[in-house]
Image (spheres, rainbow, N blue to C red):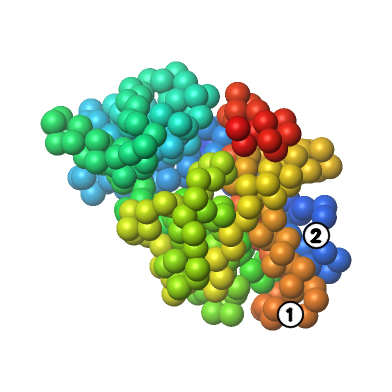
Amino acid sequence: MTTHEQPLESVLETIGRTPLVRLQNSPAGVPVYAKLESFNPGASVKDRIGRYMLERMLERGDIDAGGTVVEPTAGNTGIGFAIAAEQLGLEAVFVVPERFSVEKQQLMSALGAQVINTPTADGMGGAIERAHDLADELENAVVPQQFSNPLNTEAHYETTAPEIYDALEGEVGAIVAGCGTAGTLMGLAEYAREQDPKTHIVAVEPDGSLYGSLVGDDREEANYKTEGIGTHDPATNDLFDPSLVDDIDAVADEDAHAELRRLAREEGHLVASSAGAASVAATRVAERIAAGDLETPHESVVTVFPDSSERYLSKGIYRSFEEWES
């Protein structure tokens, strides 16, 4: 599980098989396990879709070798696509809203991609529109569109989920994961429900995000600092399937920030705010199971830590909450 013991031919072969580690503050008798996706070569879960989606799109003829991948992205997806594009003989152009991590944009450029910024006020909707306009201007270009392409979900159904179930010998009671595009959670949820329909599935979003409105929960839109998860425009999140989700847990920025600092200080996990939110929500689910308030097929909870805190140091991720929030 999650090791590479033989020489490999390409960096693409190092994607996946990441560690699954028990969190030390799990309730007694109900372990919480985190999939550490920063162990991928691009240091995030998005490496999985970068490789999987581009390989499938080349196989299907959606794009030919030598073509250009144009993707709207907050950063990690761009890094994952950039790594895969270079190894697969493709050019890469990424459209990134200005407010997102400078570190991520620098890494995309270092990997040979072109980065185009759009105004923060236009959100991901503006980035998506600009990406499609660019692709229309180029020959042999494609927008993989992580927000709506089923290959995003399929990547996690085919790779992330089987790794988790193999590691735990199928004994998974609940899956808790942040939703940005929703591809990670949907892939895990589809696989989990095939193994046992009673597996408890929880989506995680920041306070101020509107995912909960898709299942009838009251949500008040507001700005949030947590990056990589949540949505201000549910209409752009085509992959999210409410029928696969039991609960949507909104986590306050302050709670996510406190947890990411605790994870570093007490457990040695250098993870970002989306992982902090996921850990908070996963622990809540485990505590409900331990208290007898939630019945699951197994007394275990699995979550995903999508990336590393190192990409957010310039934003003061380990400073006080007030400094980070400002």
Q: Which residue is mark 2?
A: 26
Q: Residue placed at 82% from the left, 52% from the top?
A: 24
Badge number at residue 24? none
Task: Work out which quarter of the rendered image holds the C terminus and state it.
Answer: top right
Residue 65: percent from the left, percent from the top?
Answer: 23, 32
Q: Nearer the viewer, mark 1 or mark 2?
A: 1
Is residue 313 toward the left or the right of residue 66 in the image? Answer: right
Task: Please give the label number shown on residue 293.
Answer: 1
Residue 154 in view in this figure: no
The answer to which image quadrant residue 70 occupies is: top left
Q: Residue at x 74, y 74 (%)?
A: 289
Q: Amino acid type of disc 1? A: Asp
Q: Quadrant of residue 105?
A: top left
Q: Earlier in the sequence, mark 1 or mark 2?
A: 2
Give residue 98's position: percent from left, percent from top.
41, 29
Circle 1 packing at 10 Å, graded few (<14), some (14-19), many (20+), is few
| Whether residue 186 is situated above or below residue 245 in the rendered picture | above
